[in-house]
Image (cartoon, rainbow, N blue to C red):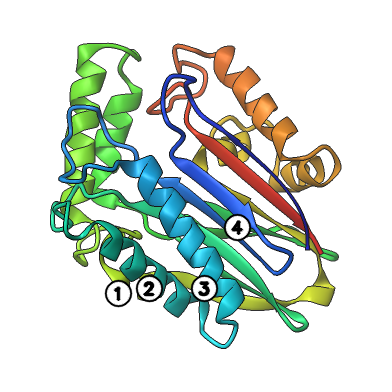
Amino acid sequence: MRVELAVDARRPDRANEDFAAATPEALVLLDGSSAPDTLRSGCTHGIAWYVRRLGVHLLTGLTDRTDRPMADCLADAIAETAALHDGTCDLTDPATPAAMVVAARLRGDTLEYLALGDSLLVLHPKDGPPRVIGDNQRFPDGEALRRQIWSTVPGTAERAALYLRYAVAVRAARNTGRGPWIAAATPHAAAHAETGAVARADLHGVAALSDGAARYTDRLELGSWADALRLLAQDGPAELIAQVRAAERSDAACLRWPRSKAHDDAAALYAAL
């Protein structure tokens, strides 16, 4: 694979909670599950620390253990990362650091893929429309709260209170069978990832995007998925993120495009096959 990637923090004074990395055979992209500053997690390290270590463990497993299914590699990576801070942090806390994960791996003439959470993997086929994989762990019980958040003014106490309520509700339900499955401290969450494979010969390439970058299509409606893939392939992930940032700045009050945060961490990766 020939890979190009870009990662951009939503604010220069905050740690970036997205992570992307690749080898010629595999790629990973993680989107940390951000939380209000007032929500304690039981972890002394934080989300940015977690996504980097989980991402590195997963990429290592995908490349070193090609005999092992991708979901098993993710379960291994979750367990290995948990072991790094099990003795210093409360990993039973519902707010323990967690991440959405997408990954792909070349194995012979096949591209294997995995998606867990609301980050996206987009297949760029030689024939036919793009195939979007992921965003497969929605939380229907939280949708009403999300819409309430979008109806309030960014930066206000009302929005902050609603965001906290939403964050607490999601964390209480995730990895319990009552809500979304996500990569946290529970290895068996990996069994709920969407996995599959496609012939390499059928693809121009594959893209991976955190939800902050996927706003190009699914929130800001700057173009279709075909437009997004064309932009990624021709001008690169940095240009896609730049166009997202320009649109966000033009709507700082979140009126034209309702969303929970005016800006979000953004990561995008395109691998040409």
Which quadrant, please, contains the C terminus? bottom right
**Disc 2/disc 1 C-alpha distance (Å):** 6 Å
Nearer mark to the viewer, of 4 and 3: 3
Q: Which mark is residue 35?
A: none
Expressed as whole percent of the image width and height from the top left, the position of residue 103 reads 56, 63
Q: Earlier in the sequence, mark 4 or mark 1?
A: 4
Of residues 101 and 58, the one nearer the viewer is 58
Labels 4 & 2 near each other (Cβ < 8 A): no
Q: Which residue is painted at 56% across and 20% down in the image?
A: 248
What residue is disc 2 on?
Answer: 75
What residue is disc 1 on?
Answer: 188
Q: Is residue 168 left or right of residue 197?
A: left
Q: Callout 2: few (<14), some (14-19), or many (20+) C-alpha neighbours within 10 Å?
A: many
Amino acid type indicated by mark 3: Gly
Q: Secondary structure at mark 4?
A: strand
Amino acid type indicated by mark 1: His
What residue is disc 3 on?
Answer: 61
